[in-house]
Image (cartoon, helix red, strand yellow):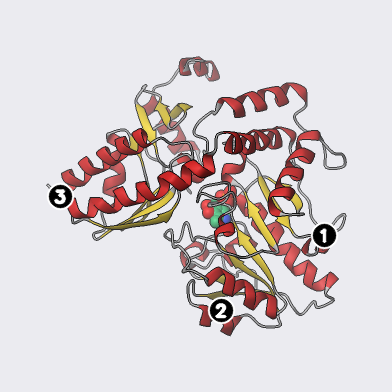
Amino acid sequence: MSYDQIDDLTAEPRTQDELVAVGRATMSKNFRQAPVVFVRGEGCYVWDKNGKRYLDFVGGIAVNGLGHSHPRVVDAITRQVRQVMHVSNLYFNEPQILLSEKLSERFGDGLVYLCNSGTEATEASLKLARRYAAKVLGQPERHEFVSFESSFHGRTMGALAATGQPKYHDGFHPMVPGFQYAKYNDIESVKRLVTDKTCGVVIEPIQAEGGVIVPQPGFLAEVSQIAKERGALMLVDEVQVGIGRTGTFFAYEQENVKPDVIWLAKALGGGFPIGAMISTAEAGRGFEPGAHGSTFGGNAVACRAALAVLDVIEQDGLLDHVRRNGPWFIEQLSALKSRNPVVAGARGRGFIVAVALDKPVAQDIVTRCLDKGLLVNKLSETSLRLLPPLNTQRSHMKAALDILGEVLEDIRG
Ligand SMILES: Cc1ncc(COP(=O)(O)O)c(C=O)c1O
């Protein structure tokens, strides 16, 4: 399909600039979109309304793990749309059962709750932990959570309270009570805060939004040990770094821990919205019929898309591909430092990488890269994030490195 065909969306075709103006006038003001309208995507490229092509190393912020419109995902969705799109959770549908079976096996005898986004999966996990303590342990006073400074878990009120960054709380007080924030990579702060009132310790295996902060060796295992000793559940947010992004299917698998609850979203649907929480059978005892739910959760089309994603990751050996190429990419980005003093270094794991800058020029770099046809993401004034699809080839990485190198030169000049 040519992207021109979507002009049948409107009676009178509009230019990119006209569309941007209408978007700015009529859409809620909570995003700061660049003035481009993307109309087509294929692999790691997207095209805007003017026909300009971009190499996409934002990937929908870790959503397009297989790139844009992967043919297997398109095929799965198309078939399912024709077959049946949605039935209520009063009944089963086939894709949701098959997806739950796969995720359960991956986790190891897990119980799967399906929803539609990352923040919903966080909410489900928080609610499960509180309810497990109250109803299964018979300890309603065990209702507190320990999460981490610099964390990000979503925007709904529970997930927001779990998020340890005051800038996201601004204007939304009072927060849901019962959350305290330990320091990531500081085990003493975890020991101080986790008590017999803690029902769950909420942690990202890599702090993604908080700056691509990788845990020190053994940190997650120690956190897990403390949670266990004090009777709290270990709750691991895999929304951004799960589904292969770090080179293992779940990021926690590299950390010698067995969480009680994990949750996924973003890349799970290959571009189609879906979230999932997976718990051990024991923690899962916290939910019985009526305890929690979602109208759209477990939607047949979303689950069919996710099944295709899991198949492609396995059949195309993408975990291996990420493990082989991630360190090379991080090394190349680090090497930019020797050629350009604006770059302070690069950090990450697999295909999630942050480039640290020694001046607040991140927005300038993002804008100049966009002009030159490369999408990268500003994490903060002094850092960029790159999230290429899991199937990105070295040739694409080299192309991205070339553009980034040119932009850094321009900035220096
Ligand atoms: C670790 C983590 N958890 C939760 C979320 C929230 O996901 P969503 O935006 O789908 O609600 C995000 C989103 O960036 C995330 O990175």
Judge whether residue 140 can be spotted in this image.
yes
Q: Secondary structure at mark 1?
A: loop
For marks 2 and 1, give the CA distance.
Answer: 27 Å
Pinpoint residue 407: horizontal percent, then vertical percent: 22, 42
The numbered dot on residue 287 is 1
Q: Amino acid at mark 1?
A: Phe
Q: Is residue 197 left or right of residue 357?
A: right
Q: Is residue 233 left or right of residue 288?
A: left
Name the residue: 36% across, 37% down. 394
Judge whether residue 63 can be spotted in this image.
no
CB atoms at circles 3 and 1 under 8 Å apart? no
CB atoms at circles 2 and 3 under 8 Å apart? no
CB atoms at circles 2 and 1 under 8 Å apart? no
The numbered dot on residue 190 is 2
Q: Is residue 101 left or right of residue 386?
A: right
Pinpoint residue 209: horizontal percent, then vertical percent: 47, 57
